[in-house]
């Protein structure tokens, strides 16, 4: 049974272990930077089983006009147990009043299905909205 915590920032080693487990190794090249990034988030929700970090969701936001779901990840050994959905609900609920809720994810079919089940729409599918999405990676 997962225990969810609000505002608990895992150690750099715990974060690196989770991010590496899901294949997000770009983030773990500098574990101290990752820890600072997570610490700087508007909201961090973590899932634990005893002392094991099972998952994490974090939101970057101004609290009024935009909430960006920066990361939501669950250790592969604990996926498909509802942990990701619960992390999402706990992370996004405090921003219910915010009009724009945004996330960027990789192009994997399971990702799309998961986020659509949470009410997100891919920008290319928003008809008549005149939306474009731009991103720059340095």
Image (tube, rainbow, N blue to C red):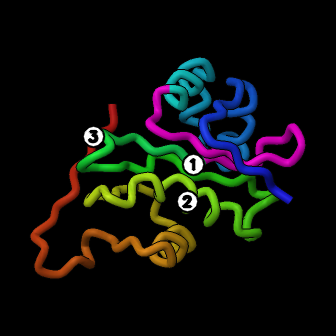
Marks 2,1: beta carbons within 8 A: yes
CA–CA distance between discs 2 and 1? 7 Å
Q: Which mark is residue 88?
A: 2
Left or right? Give the position of 90 relative to 16.
left
Q: Position of residue 66 (x, y in %)?
A: 28, 49
Callout 1 secondary element: strand
Residue 49 belongs to magenta span: yes
Left or right? Give the position of 71 relative to 4.
left
- Name the residue tied to disc 3: 136
Give the mark nearest the N terminus, 3 or 2.
Answer: 2
Callout 3 secondary element: loop
CA–CA distance between discs 3 and 1? 22 Å
When the figure is inspected, residue 30 is found, relative to residue 22, above or below; the finding is: above
Q: Position of residue 105 (x, y in %)?
A: 45, 57
Q: Which mark is residue 57?
A: 1
* Category of crowding for the residue at label 1, using alpha-carbon neighbours closer than 10 angstroms: few (below 14), some (14–19), many (at least 20): many
Give the mark nearest the N terminus, 2 or 1.
Answer: 1
In this rendering, the count of numbered labels is: 3
Viewer-nearest of discs 3 and 2 = 2
Assign the C terminus to one quadrant of the image.
top left
Residue found at x 48% / y 70% = 115
Give the mark nearest the N terminus, 3 or 1.
Answer: 1
Residue found at x 46% / y 34% = 41
When the figure is inspected, residue 22 is found, relative to residue 107, above or below; the finding is: above
**What segment carries the magenta color?**
40-56
Residue found farthest to the top? 32
């Amino acid at each position: 049974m997962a225990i969810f915590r609000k505002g608990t920032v895992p150690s750099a080693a715990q974060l690196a272990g989770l991010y590496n487990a899901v294949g997000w190794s770009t983030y773990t090249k500098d574990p101290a930077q990752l820890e600072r990034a997570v610490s700087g988030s508007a909201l961090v929700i973590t899932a634990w089983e005893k002392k094991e970090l099972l998952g994490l969701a974090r939101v970057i936001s101004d609290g009024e006009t935009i909430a960006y779901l920066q990361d939501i990840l669950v250790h592969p050994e604990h996926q498909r147990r509802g942990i990701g959905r619960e992390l999402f609900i706990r992370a996004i609920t405090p921003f219910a009043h915010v009009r724009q809720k945004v996330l960027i994810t990789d192009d994997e079919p399971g990702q799309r299905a998961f986020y659509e089940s949470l009410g997100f729409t891919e920008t290319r599918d928003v008809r008549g909205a005149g939306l474009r999405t731009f991103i720059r990676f340095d």
